[in-house]
Image (cartoon, coloured by chain):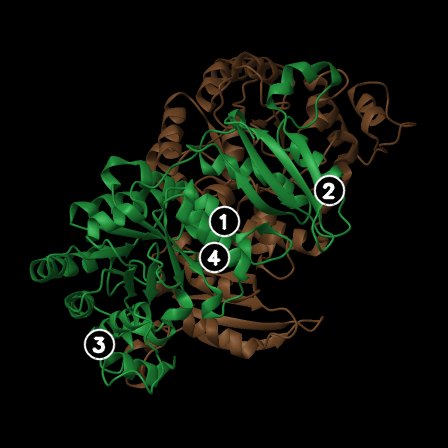
Chain colours: A green, B brown
């Protein structure tokens, strides 16, 4: 591909001819139908079927090159071009997407930015999720935050299912938690990050994000598949919303789970997040027994790391399971735990201690079984959740 | 359901137990896990598995009622709740979605609003699509517009794959076309609507929509599945973007085409459009040989009509095919044609005349075959595209 082209690898179910359908995509999604005497005039706008191939299991594939000038430099018009109307004609799955390096919107922080903000340099970052979430008052969040922050947790985030409700809004949570973040900084010398859930219509969401930043927020949580990548792009580019964005994969299964439709997760949670302005990306992990192949997960993580984003493998992490989520010596990752931290038998603070203890033992090559782990938070966690 | 609840009917592939998974959705997408002593406190926030059933072909179904207070009144938080994280756990498809009447954002125009703007009262509206689109200069659009407008076309829209490009932007097209719309009004006494394609990051798109309106635009075209329903909600609610929204189904196949994942089209192109602020909805039609069942299409259209939106069955319409797209006497519909109008052998104006001639014959019960249709635009169209 050239710097002014967009390369897409499509895969079709068996029985669909990749040449015919690759051409339908190349032409139908660009110049449409046209009279032969117009060919020269419209050549510049035409997609090109570059090659067809067959997967190991016999599915047809087509690689199509689109002119980057056909789109507006944003993800919305990109999605309309590469999938758009064609998607209504039958099953097709996008396996890979290569964009010009600066296409779309790039996150302003990434893993290095998160390290700079938190001051954590030489180990993975540890993140917690407020659990439960719906029904808690702002003061409840503040109390939990104090406990995990004083115990040394690096980051915390809202549950993605906690938008603005009668009992707590993003702003009321932030206002209750901001003084606690300051306390934690006073006590530990470190700025803890709190990614607060953004919700609402796009205009309200963007306004809310500005107000939150003005009130001292230091990170956002957004579900771009549900809200639109265009909304994440807006947040990631405006000077008034200059905070790290944690992208949650809510609804991603509807677009990435099917073998026949939508996107490979490496595109949906990889390329589109990279070019959509995310700084950190939560994703399902085979270690947590979600249906994602180890190959796809590895490719997704490699892509995020290569592009400087923070990978956040999620779902099912508890202290004893840490070795399954982390290669030894691996640092470029955020370990994210909800109930596996918050529901520790001795409380969320003990959950944090259990994680750090697990990390230390693992890095030192010490065994994690109950015969070896001494009494304390990690042992209590393993007794509850197993290794 | 009650006015403060959100009812969702889920369907799972065979082999997935609807009771187990219905409960996972009801609990996991609301209160998550919690300690038994917290049950009373969180009851208000808990989803309820109302009933399970089995489809005719043996798929399990679960109806779940969610408290409306769990979400922010917008479509983004709704999607995070009803599908969200669960979507990563395995295949599930949303068959129906019942929302409180005022949930989300309602379009400000609908079919009646479009009738009021165009002054067309007693027949279907006829809409054309600028074809080709990429590569044309603004003056080319103006020229086509003049021809079809003077011939009596009610509405025209950009191709959805035509965002802001080097050759034409939404604003440059509008500036070239606005004087022509005025000419057409002068000549015919009617305001023709031109739905111009919106593109860009959410904030830019909303700003662009305002600028377009200030410059005399009278309708928008948006692809909400690609850009985010939250963006459509923003447009549909702000006073500065008070124009009818034509919602294009680009990318909808990726979320609605699979039998196992995502949404039934009646939800994706029906309920979510109704509560997302659309005024008119383009959708694939079996008449145009796209893979949508007649039952789903009928249900979708009924829903749009019931809610006052304008249904726009699309793809494959040409003058001779009109009887397949329209029940005799049906008025609550917008007939939308691209190449089937623009590529008429005698030009776009003749294409418009052919459509009106076809409509008149059809309504009068006159046959459409070549033996009966006299020489003229309709006959030329049938000679090219068939009946």
Residue B1 visible? The answer is no
Say whether disc 1 or disc 4 marks the residue closer to the N-terminus: 4
Q: Mark 1: give few (<14), some (14-19) or many (20+) Cα within 10 Å.
A: many
**Label 3 in the same subunit as label 4:** yes
Considering depth in this image, is A157 or B274 the residue closer to the camera? A157
Q: Which mark is in front, 1 or 4?
A: 1
Q: Is residue A348 left or right of residue B140?
A: left
Secondary structure category for the residue under label 2:
helix
Quadrant housing the C terminus of chain B: top right
**Label 1 in the same subunit as label 3:** yes
Considering depth in this image, is B185 or B102 the residue closer to the camera? B102
Secondary structure category for the residue under label 3:
helix
Residue B82 place in picture, x, y as percent: 46, 63
Residue B333 place in picture, x, y as percent: 62, 40
Mark 2 highlights which residue? Answer: A18
**Label 1 in the same subunit as label 2:** yes
Q: Furthest-left residue in view?
A: A186
Determine which of the numbered discs, if any, sits on residue A251 in the image: 4
Mark 1 highlights which residue? Answer: A268
Q: Quadrant of residue A326?
A: bottom left
Answer whether labels 2 and 4 touch (C-beta < 8 Å).
no
């Amino acid at each position: 591909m050239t710097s002014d082209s967009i390369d897409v690898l499509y895969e079709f179910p068996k029985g669909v001819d990749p040449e015919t359908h690759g051409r339908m995509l190349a032409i139908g999604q660009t110049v449409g139908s046209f009279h032969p005497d117009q060919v020269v005039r419209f050549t510049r706008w035409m997609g090109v079927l570059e090659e067809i191939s067959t997967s190991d299991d016999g599915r047809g594939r087509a690689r199509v090159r689109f002119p980057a000038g056909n789109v507006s430099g944003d993800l919305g018009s990109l999605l309309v071009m590469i999938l758009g109307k064609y998607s209504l004609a039958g099953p097709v799955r996008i396996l890979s997407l290569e964009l010009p390096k600066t296409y779309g919107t790039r996150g302003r922080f990434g893993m290095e930015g998160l390290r700079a903000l938190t001051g954590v340099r030489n180990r993975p970052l540890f993140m917690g999720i407020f659990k439960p979430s719906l029904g808690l008052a702002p003061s409840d969040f503040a109390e939990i935050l104090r406990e995990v922050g004083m115990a040394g947790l690096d980051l915390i985030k809202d549950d993605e299912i906690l938008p603005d409700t009668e009992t707590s809004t993003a702003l009321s949570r932030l206002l209750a938690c901001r003084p606690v973040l300051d306390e934690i900084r006073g006590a530990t010398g470190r700025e803890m990050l709190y990614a607060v859930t953004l919700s609402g219509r796009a205009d309200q969401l963007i306004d809310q994000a500005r107000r939150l930043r003005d009130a001292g927020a230091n990170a956002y949580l957004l579900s771009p598949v549900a809200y639109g990548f265009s909304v994440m792009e807006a947040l990631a580019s405006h000077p008034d919303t200059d905070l790290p964005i944690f992208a949650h994969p809510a609804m991603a299964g509807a677009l990435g789970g099917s073998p026949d439709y939508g996107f490979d997760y490496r595109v949906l949670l990889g390329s589109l997040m990279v070019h959509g302005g995310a700084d950190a990306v939560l994703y399902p992990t085979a270690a947590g027994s979600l249906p994602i192949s180890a190959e796809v997960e590895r490719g997704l993580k490699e892509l995020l790391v290569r592009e400087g984003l923070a990978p956040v493998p999620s779902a099912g992490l508890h202290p004893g399971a840490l070795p399954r989520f982390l290669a030894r010596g691996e640092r470029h990752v955020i370990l994210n735990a909800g109930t596996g931290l918050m529901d520790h038998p001795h409380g969320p603070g003990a959950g944090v201690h259990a994680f750090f203890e697990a990390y230390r033992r693992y890095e030192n090559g010490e065994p994690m079984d109950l015969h070896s782990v001494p009494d304390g938070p990690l042992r209590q966690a393993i007794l509850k959740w197993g290794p």
